[in-house]
Structure formats: C-alpha cells, structure tokens
Image (cartoon, coloured by chain):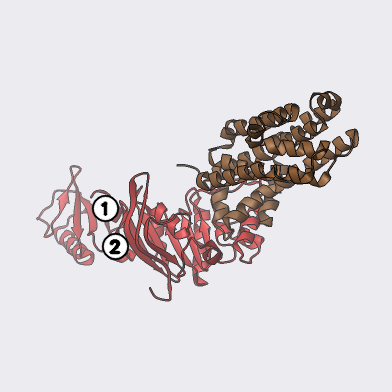
Amino acid sequence: MLSIALSELIQIFRNRLVLLTSFVIPIVPCAFFIYRHEIFAELGSLGYIAAVVMFTVGAFGLYTTTVTTLASRRQNLFLKRLRSTPASDAGILVGLMLPVTVLAIVQMVAILAVLAAVTGAPDSVPLLAVAVLSTLVMMLALGLATAGLTNSPEHAQVTTLPVSLGAIGVSTWVGITGTEELTQLKRLLPGGSATELVLNAWNGGVPAADSLSLLLPTLAWVVFAVALASRMFRWEPRR
Amino acid sequence: MTSTTVIDVDRLNLSYGGFHAVKDLSFHVQKGELYALLGTNGAGKTSTLETAEGHRAADSGTVRVFGRSPRDRRAVRSRMGIMLQESGFSPDLTVKESVQLIGTLSRRTDRVERVLDIVDLKSKSDTKVSQLSGGEKRRLDFATAVYGQPELIFLDEPTTGLDIQSRDALWQAVDKLREDGSTIVLTTHYLEEAQQHADRIGLMHKGTLHQEGTVSELTRTLPATIRFSLAAPAPEPLPLLLRSDDRGKFLIETFDLPHDLYTLLGWAHTHGAELRELEAGPTRLDDVFRAISAD
C-alpha cells in the first residue's frame, strides 16, 4: 500500500498539469476569501469563510483529483496491473488516494491557519477538526462513487461538476442564510450539515454535543456513496 | 488432480453481454510444463486466461491454481507472474520505478537491474514509460512478470511487436526459467513459436477445446504434403494419388511421408522426369488452424 502511495506521489509531482489544477488552482479562491474576509464575514460570518474554503479544497482539490486519477489509472490499465499482484483492492485504493488526501489535509490546515491568524482563532479547534475530517471522508467516498460513473479523465471534467458545484453551492447557501429556515432540507443536502458544523466550530455559541449530531447526515452520505461505489466501481475499462 | 497439477480448469463457462464465450472447458497444466492456449480470434482464450489469472470470475465450473481459487490473490499471486496483453504501466513512472513497484507488490525478492538486464532495458532504467516504444513496453512487461522467478508465469502474446533479436532473447529467458522449474502458460498468434516451445497445446475454437496434445499429436491428424511441378509432361503416370492446380503444380497428401517421397523420387529417377520446386514437409500447426477455421 505504501509503495503504491509513493509511486502515486511521484506521479503527481511529475505531472505538472495535475499539480496545477488540483493543488494550486483551489488556493486562488481561498486566498481571495481570506483577503476580502471583512466583506464575506459581513455577508455570512467568519465560519462561512472557513466552510467555503474547506469545500473549495475538498471539491476541486480532493474530490475532482480522486475521480480524475482513478479514471486515468483505469483507462491506461494501471489498475488492472496493480490487481495482477497480491495487493488487495482496499490496499490499492487506499494507496492511490493517500497522497491526494494528505495534500488536501495540508492545504486545508494551512488555509484555515492563515484565516485564524488574520481574523482570530476559531471557537473550538477539536470540533473544527472533526468537521474537516468528516468532510474529507465524504468527498473521498463521493469521489469513489463518481469514478464508477466516469470512463476517462476527460469525462471526469463533466461527471465531477454536479457534486463539486453542488457542495460549494450548498455550503454557500447554508453559510450565508444559516439553518433556521428549511433546517431539515439544508442539513440533509451533501455538505449542508458539515457546513453548519464548521459554522458552530468557528463562530461558537452552540453546545458541542448538539453540534456532534450534525455528523450523522455526513456519515449517511459516506455510507450511501460507498454503497454506490461498491456497485458501480470498475477496475478495467469497458470494452 | 495430482500434486503436480498447477492449473486445473474443470467445466468452465463464461459469458458476457449474452455471448457464451467459453463452454464447458476443461484442461490441466502440470508443473514445469509450457502449455500454449491457442485459438482463432474470439475463441475465448483471453477470457479463459483472465479467469485462470483471477481477473475474471467463472460463471460456472471451477478453476484452481496451486489447488486454490485464483481469486484468492493473497494466496496465489505471489507465486505467479502475469504478462498482460496490454501493458498497463503509468506513463509518468520510469522503467526502474515501474519494475520496483510491481516487484515490491509481488512480495518476491529480486533485483531490478537483474530483470532489466534479461530484457536488455538496463540502459532505459531512468526513461519514463511514456517514452518507450511498443516493443520496449512488452519487454518491460516481461521483466515485471519474471521478477523473483515465480513458479507460474502467464505470457499473453508476449512477442507481439518485438523484433527478432528481442524475440530470441525472450525465448532464451523463458528456457532459463523453465530450467529452474517455472511453469508457463502462453497465448500467441505466432504459431511457429508454439510449435517450437510448447510441450502441449490446447486449441480453442468457438469457446471449446477443439483439440489438445503435443505438437506432433495435433499435426498427426492431418496429412503431410509434397509439392512439385514437372519440366515436361509426365512420361508415365505416377503411382501415387495426386492433385494438380491450374498452374501445373502437383500436390500429394500423405500420412506416410518418407514412403511416398521415396516412391516419387524413384519414379522421377527411373523416367528421367525433372522435379521442379520440390517441397516436402510435415503438417504445420498453421494447417491445423486452417482446418478448424474452415469447419
């Protein structure tokens, strides 16, 4: 598994285009949100900025890269090659996704640290960490499921749009308007409850125990996405 | 099944998209053997091979490799090397990194330099896979398959796209592996390779095993041929059954080549007939193939 992860890391750094689109481009809007934080804090809150940068990295960095990588490794039969060895399916997937996940975590932590340095520390760092981790897991699971519906890396440019734009849209909607109205709907949409969790963690004012129940919809999306992936994921190109 | 059976396929059936690709197929491969699975296009040999490799599940019937299910990757894969029909390497990794990765995952021990030396790719160690030619990719594939000298090696059209030197080098490497006890399963479109190297051949046609046996067992079922033309019309009828084509060339089909050739030469000598373009030879695997394709 670690040898697969290492080879994947080498491939990411050797392919400048992947490095640029997956890791540099998501940083641009995040920098903008932090630079104009006063406007966005007035529009929503500082927690809203934290949520939207988290989803920008999660959707455009982690999720899109996961789908594109898996589709590309399948298309050139690299997945089949890996499956010709004793490595288990789970080991192969974890190995392939580990480097992009670690890079996404580093990015999120760095961006949120800059936000905290500029605007002040969040109310609860542990709760924020839980929110970030659960979002990462959800985006990874959705990436696996989407990879099952994606035939090629080019096709990924289309298939990733609904989830990535949807998640950012939901986090913007929830971040700006809150969850006082349409509470159930907003919490059930993918990314809705995770956004609320970030808002609570950053802005404070809600007991931690109440916030933790917000994990349930996110975990439900994970279960749904993994179930979908186990039905849809293919290891070889369709002939 | 005996203790020396490496692959045991029993009444295997495979279908996809409503097409029954493999029907009640049974065959065994013994330890140390080179078994060639040959067939016409669409005969089902790649599907059969993929099932034995563990890439595909059987619809019915059983496939055992080393006495276990080939789907049990942990148990069987470290004992087998697989050269796929299409390479499947990452274009952004170098030759050395590719062998290192697959070699490490195989859980066998070997040196990357050693296997690259076998396929004459040592000078390309630091070249990215995307910059290799088709033949070089095939050789890289072979290098990963033989990493750590596995007990069982699948070679799926190993020499396609290779020049003659690389082809000879590859067969030399296979011979060496066999000396060390490896079992080989081969598919190829180059029938002369199978004829030259295989201990036994399974000939697939339309999803079933049409014929199976050694090369001589297979070719024995068809007559050998003698071809010639005559400089002048025959002075005396030949005491053999022969056919002639419209360009004046004669053909004798025989199951007793030495005897009939002797008769022909004696007849020519006695009557002073000049035999031109004389060819005589045993039946080749190609002829066996043509015969089943014509069915």
Mark toward the start of the polypeptide (2 vs 1):
2
Chain colored red: B
Q: In which quarter of the image is residue A106?
A: top right
Q: In this view, does B47 lie to the left or right of A80?
A: left
- Which mark is drawn over residue B144? none
Mark 2, residue position = B218
Image side of residue B172 versus residue A55, left or right:
left
Give the left or right position of residue A239, taking residue A206 as reference: left
Q: Regarding mark 1 in the picture, which secondary structure is present there?
A: helix
Q: In this figure, what is the number of numbered marks? A: 2
The amino acid marked with disc number 1 is: Ile
Q: What element carries label 2?
A: helix
Circle 1 sits on which residue? Answer: B292
* Chain containing the residue with disc 2: B
Q: Can residue B133 be seen in this view?
A: no
Residue under the image location 81 percent in, 29 percent down? A45
The reply to whether residue A119 is visible in this rendering is: yes
Q: Could you tell me residue A33's position as x and y percent?
A: 81, 28
Residue type (three-letter) at the residue carrying disc 2: Leu
User: How far across and how far down the image is residue A136, in percent?
Assistant: 70, 43
Q: Which of A69 and A126 is in front in this view?
A: A126
